[in-house]
Every structure is written in structure tokens, then in C-alpha cells.
Image: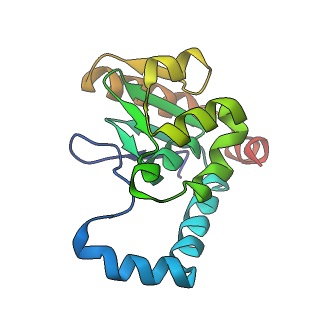
Amino acid sequence: SVFSVVLTGAGKYFCTGMDLGQGNQAKLQEELESGVAAQRSLEMFSALREFPKPLIVRMNGPAFGGGCGLVFVGDIRIARKESFICFAEVGRGIVPALISAFIVQQMGEFLSLQYMTTGMRFPVEEMMERGLLTAVVADEAALDERVALYCTELKKCAPQAVQATKA
């Protein structure tokens, strides 16, 4: 009965990534050193990428850090025009290594290196021009409309064929 899954954010951001705040530093440092954080993140991104149903990313706002990885594991990606991605980790002394496994093959080595080393914002209009998004829309209503269109189209398809095609 499930034909697709929509992944979106609450509020003005799609995803701000890992909690790098001061209050979380001790736990984060421990999880980074033990490899627990890396293992959990890799499992999550892999599960989303390999999910048997189409994953529609409804990018309602900016994505930072690991949130960029969430955008790139999506099969269909629709973003509001004010959105952008930003590999903010580099500014905090962290390498965006885990998400790079899901991003570099799609963005390419040169472009990935440019944005991952500078932490500059990558606007969705440019992402669209480079074939990294399905659509960029003007506002929340248009975002909902475009997501609904893809959900409707996917309901017309044979679920087994969609799953086999995705695999």
C-alpha cells in the first residue's frame, strides 16, 4: 500500500545536520572517537539510499552538513528556490567524509571538492542547472503541488517494477 516516502523538514530548515552545539560536545567527541557516530550515520544513509520504495526529498529549506547527505540519497528531489546546501562541517573542523560516499559520485570530484573544502552555500538553482535536483519551485504551495504530482504518478506504476528498477 506504500508507493513512495516523502522526506522533509519541520520549520524553516530541511535539515541542519548533526548537533554540534556546546552542550553535545562531550557525547559527540566520544561517539566520533569510538566510531559509533560514523557507523550509525552510514547505516542511516545506506538504508535510505537502498530503501525499496522511491524516496522523494521535499526540500523545504536549507540543508547543512549531514542534511546535504539526506538530499542526495533521494530519488526525486524538489526544492524551494530559497534553499541551498552547505557542507558546514569544514568550518567546525570536521570532514564531511560519510556523506561524501553518497554525494561525490553525483556531484563529481571537482564540484564536491570546491563546496566541501570552502563550506560555501550551493544554491538550488545551480544544483538544478547541474542536474542534481528534479525541480525548483517558488513557494510552499508549489512544493506541495509538485510532491503530490510525483506521488500520484508513482501510484500509477507497478510497485514491483518500481522496486526492481530502483534496485
Closer-to-camera residue (157/146): 146
Q: Position of residue 45 (x, y in %)?
A: 58, 59
Q: Residue at x 68, y 52 (%)?
A: 101
Question: Quarter-wise, where is residue 141 in the image?
Answer: top left
Image point (21%, 44%), residue name:
11
Q: Does residue 118 appear left or right of residue 42 in this picture? A: left
Residue 154, given in percent of the width and then of the height, sits at 58, 34
Seen at 50% across and 18% down, the residue is 126
Q: Tell me where residue 74 appears, x and y as whole percent.
A: 56, 42
Q: Is residue 25 above or below residue 48?
A: below
Query: Is 18 above or below relative to 153?
Result: below
Q: How is the image coloured?
A: rainbow
Quarter holding residue 6 = top left
Q: Nearer the viewer, residue 23 or 154?
A: 23
Residue 124 x/y as whole percent: 44, 24
Side of 93 relative to 98 (left or right) = left
Q: Nearer the viewer, residue 78 or 20?
A: 20
* Residue 40 in the figure: left or right of residue 84: right
Residue in view at x 22 percent, y 40 percent: 12
Q: How many marks?
A: 0
64 vs 151, nearest the viewer: 64
